Amino acid sequence: MKKHLTDAEIRKIFTDPYSLKRGIKLWKDAEKRGEEFIKNIKEERKKLLERTT
């Protein structure tokens, strides 16, 4: 597997319903490696949740 995915590749993986299982596996693998985009997504989600409560 490639170490870095482009934005287009990431978007394709997460928007295709047939690749959801693959997307979940890629997400978990990237999370274990500490990928920056995963950290950014988590931080954005935390901020959004804090603003809505």
Image (cartoon, rainbow, N blue to C red):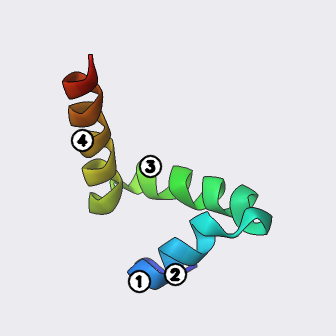
Q: Residue visible at 19% across and 26% down?
A: 51
- Residue 43 - label: 4
* Badge 1: residue crowd in 10 Å (few <14, some 14–19, many ≥20): few
| Secondary structure of the residue carrying numbered label 3 | helix
Sequence order check, earlier mark of 2 and 4 = 2
- Residue 42 - label: none
Q: Residue visible at 75% across and 63% down?
A: 17
Q: Is residue 53 left or right of residue 33?
A: left
The location of residue 24, given as percent across then percent down, is 63, 53
The location of residue 49, given as percent across then percent down, is 29, 27
Sequence order check, earlier mark of 3 and 1 = 1
The quarter of the picture where residue 47 lies is top left
Front-lying residue, 45 or 22: 45
| Secondary structure of the residue carrying numbered label 4 | helix
- Tell me the distance, in whole angstroms, between the alpha carbons under discs 2 and 4: 22 Å
Q: Residue visible at 63% across and 61% down?
A: 23
Q: Which residue is mark 3?
A: 32
The quarter of the picture where residue 46 lies is top left
Sequence order check, earlier mark of 4 and 1 = 1
Tell which tag, 3 or 4, sits nearer the viewer: 4
- Tell me the distance, in whole angstroms, between the alpha carbons under discs 2 and 3: 19 Å
Residue that extends furthest to the right in the rendered view of this protein: 18
Q: Is residue 31 left or right of residue 22?
A: left
What amino acid type is highlighted by mark number 1? Thr
Q: Are marks 2 and 1 in contact (CB under 8 Å)?
A: yes
What amino acid type is highlighted by mark number 4? Glu
| Secondary structure of the residue carrying numbered label 1 | loop
Tell which tag, 2 or 3, sits nearer the viewer: 2
Relative to 48, is 44 above or below?
A: below
What amino acid type is highlighted by mark number 2? Glu
